Image (tube, helix red, strand yellow):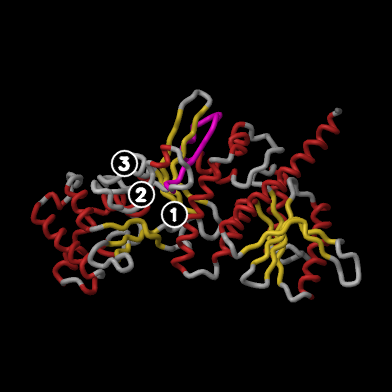
């Protein structure tokens, strides 16, 4: 086989891998959101003409509305190739409109496309957004961005609580998928590989660069969630629900995803990550639920040496104030004395509270794996993520906007558990 034949064979394989990667991404998403139906290689034709003239590679039908998404992909962006795809989308949209069905068209490339393709894609995307050319695509993006767009569409009609729960769970799943995707290891070890295609390499790369910027070649990576049926491995079992000495459930650990990496020198690195996927850019996400009694017990065993609460009188007043809040569930219903004391003095513990609520530090119910080492926050607008160390999170929250009792957190109580537990919501402002 000569060089040209080899090149053509590689291009063909690259194209097949791109289509296969997108198909698997869509299949996973459909399993997550039952209101979406996936159809492959759907054919359309004008009335009275060839009914197979226009082929749509991937079609998503939103069953709760008359809307189809028409999706095409390529491993390499070429303008002449896109013109042919524009023709197909133009006529397919027209046919669907005549049938009373709305449609949107999206052009997708792999996460690890080459620089030329990425540059051409961004230019094409600008024209779509500016609407300064005749165009029948509604969006152009890499696969990870498309996955996020689809997820947002699938949840847009949900109630806020349901949406937050689904997005939080989905954020954990896509992080696990990225680090269990063996293709990402191949691409990490060989960035020049343009045949292997991945739907989530950008997530894998950005997270790993932050967690372990000095890591070189990788033998394998794997990730776990603390979900009973996700993985029977003994490591993941250590992430399961926290229980007290009597076996009673005490809630979830702070670690949502545990990542393990083995490098070429047989050195294993392990990272415990708390994952947050807020529904809005300035949204607050529930990060802690538990009793005031448990919090006070943990605090007594780990009070910072310079804290005013080393004074027993101050600690007793803190205890009285927090128990008062737990009992009534809001500042408005508290006694004036307890409310004023917390408003004036609780901020002395802000750093300790950040460590405790966000990462689980000093929580005696958690094992080492259940205490998070890093915080990953997904941008609800783009699907990109920021990953922050404990120190970076402390700095951001300590210098951010304060909320209840002069702390960075909003304090309330879980539904139907007033008097028994408190609920803490944290700010996760995105600056991407």
Query: Which part of the image, by quadrant, shows the N terminus?
Result: top right
Which residue has dot 2 on it? Answer: 241
Residue at 18% in and 63% down: 323
Q: Which label lies toward us, 1 or 3? A: 3
Callout 1 touching callout 2 (CB < 8 Å): no
In the rendering, at what x and y percent does residue 398 appear? 32, 54
Q: Which residues are magenta?
A: 209-227
In the rendering, at what x and y percent does residue 73 appear? 73, 52
In the rendering, at what x and y percent does residue 176 appear? 51, 45
| CA distance separating discs 2 and 3 | 11 Å
Which is more N-terminal, label 3 or label 2? 2
Q: Tell me, yes or no, if residue 297 can be seen here.
A: yes
Q: Secondary structure at mark 1?
A: strand
- Residue most extreme to the left: 313
Q: Indicate the quadrant where residue 125 lies.
A: bottom right
**Mark number displayed over residue 429:** none
Between 46 and 75, the one lying in front of the other is: 46
**Neighbour tally class for label 1: few under 14, some 14-19, many 20 plus, Cα within 10 Å:** many
Q: Secondary structure at mark 3?
A: loop
Q: Which label lies toward us, 2 or 3? A: 2
Which is more N-terminal, label 3 or label 1? 1
Between 287 and 346, the one lying in front of the other is: 287
- In the rendered image of this protein, does residue 100 appear above or below residue 242? below
Residue at 55% in and 55% down: 383
Which is more N-terminal, label 2 or label 1? 2
Q: Secondary structure at mark 2?
A: loop
| CA distance separating discs 1 and 2 | 18 Å
**Relative to 334, 136 lies left or right:** right
Which residue has dot 3 on it? Answer: 367
**Relative to 108, 375 lies left or right:** left
Which residue has dot 1 on it? Answer: 276
**Neighbour tally class for label 3: few under 14, some 14-19, many 20 plus, Cα within 10 Å:** few
């Amino acid at each position: 086989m000569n060089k040209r034949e080899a090149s053509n064979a590689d291009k063909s394989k690259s194209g097949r891998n791109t289509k296969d990667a997108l198909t698997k991404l869509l299949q996973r998403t459909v399993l997550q959101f039952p209101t979406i139906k996936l159809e492959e290689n759907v054919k359309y034709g004008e009335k009275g003409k060839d009914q197979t003239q226009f082929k749509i590679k991937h079609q998503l039908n939103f069953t709760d509305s008359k809307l189809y998404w028409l999706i095409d992909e390529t491993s390499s962006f070429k303008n002449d190739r896109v013109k042919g795809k524009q023709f197909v989308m133009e006529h397919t949209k027209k046919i669907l409109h005549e049938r009373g069905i709305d449609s949107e068209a999206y052009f997708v490339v792999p996460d690890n496309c080459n620089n030329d393709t990425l540059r051409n894609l961004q230019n094409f995307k600008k024209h779509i957004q500016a609407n300064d050319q005749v165009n029948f695509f509604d969006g152009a993006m890499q696969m990870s961005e498309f996955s996020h767009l689809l997820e947002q569409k699938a949840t847009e009609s949900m109630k806020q609580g349901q949406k937050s729960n689904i997005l939080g769970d989905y954020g954990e799943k896509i992080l696990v998928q990225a680090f269990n995707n063996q293709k990402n290891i191949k691409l990490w070890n060989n960035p020049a590989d343009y045949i292997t295609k991945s739907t989530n390499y950008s997530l894998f790369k950005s997270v790993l660069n932050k967690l372990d910027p000095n890591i070189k070649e990788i033998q394998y990576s794997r990730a776990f969630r603390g979900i009973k049926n996700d993985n029977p491995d003994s490591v993941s079992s250590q992430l399961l629900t926290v229980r007290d000495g009597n076996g009673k459930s005490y809630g979830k650990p702070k670690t949502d995803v545990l990542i393990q990496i083995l490098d070429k020198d047989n050195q294993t690195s392990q990272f415990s990550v708390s994952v947050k996927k807020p529904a809005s850019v300035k949204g607050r996400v529930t990060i802690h639920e538990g009793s005031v009694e448990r919090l006070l017990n943990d605090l007594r065993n780990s009070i910072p040496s310079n804290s005013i609460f080393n004074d027993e009188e101050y600690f007793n007043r803190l205890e009285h104030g927090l128990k008062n809040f737990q009992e009534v569930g809001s500042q408005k219903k508290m006694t004036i004395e307890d409310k004023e004391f917390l408003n004036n003095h609780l901020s002395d513990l802000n750093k300790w509270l950040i460590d405790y609520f966000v990462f689980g530090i000093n929580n005696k119910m958690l094992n080492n794996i259940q205490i998070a080492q890093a915080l990953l926050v997904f941008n609800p607008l783009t699907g990109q993520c920021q990953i922050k160390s404990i120190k970076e999170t402390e700095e951001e929250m300590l210098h951010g906007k304060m909320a209840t009792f002069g702390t960075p957190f909003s304090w309330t109580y879980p539904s139907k558990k007033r008097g028994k537990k408190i609920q803490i919501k944290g700010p996760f402002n995105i600056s991407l």
